[in-house]
Image (spheres, rainbow, N blue to C red):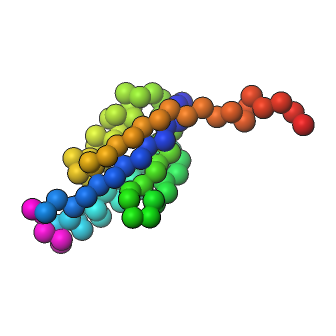
Amino acid sequence: MALFAVRLVSRQPTEIPADQWQAIVADQLRAVRANYDQGKLRAIYREAGTGVLAIYDVSDARELDTVLAQLPMWRYFHEVEVRALWDMVPALPSA
């Protein structure tokens, strides 16, 4: 498996009414929960006033692309940053 830090920032488009946007957000939360329950999402953190930072645990970058593209809010993310992570703990010397 591969770990990725994914920073996602979305904005409500002006042409989408607030109630419709809230429905999209609700769908997004359900999809994120499903990713967590499936073990694809290890953690998600809200960045106050900006977006979220999510830690995904997937087989490779191709699977990450697929998972992200299936999110209901995917087309509304105006900023996406992805960084591959490496767990250094197994490589640390014993005390």
Question: Any magenta on residue 17?
Answer: yes
Toward the left, the furthest residue is: 15
Tell me: residue 2, above or below residue 51.
above
Quarter of the C terminus within the rendering: top right
Toward the right, the furthest residue is: 95
Tell me: residue 93, above or below residue 29.
above
Tell me: residue 15, above or below residue 72.
below
Q: Residue at x 32, y 35 (%)?
A: 66
Q: Is residue 72 visible?
A: no
Q: Is residue 32 visible?
A: yes
Quarter of the N terminus within the rendering: top right
Give the extent of the magenta segment. 15-19
In this figure, what is the number of numbered marks?
Answer: 0
Q: Position of residue 5 (x, y in %)?
A: 49, 41
Q: Residue at x 46, y 51 (%)?
A: 53
Tell me: residue 68, above or below residue 60.
below
Q: Quadrant of residue 11?
A: bottom left
Instruction: Tell me: 54 left or right of 15.
Output: right
Seen from the viewer's position, the closer of residues 47 and 55 is: 47
Q: Quadrant of residue 62?
A: top left
Q: Residue at x 38, y 59 (%)?
A: 50
Instruction: Tell me: 37 left or right of 8.
Output: right
Magenta region's main secondary structure?
loop
Q: Position of residue 84 (x, y in %)?
A: 50, 32
Question: Any magenta on residue 56?
Answer: no
Q: Position of residue 57 (x, y in %)?
A: 51, 38
Seen from the viewer's position, the closer of residues 51 and 29 is: 51
Q: Position of residue 73 (x, y in %)?
A: 26, 52
Toward the front, the furthest residue is: 49
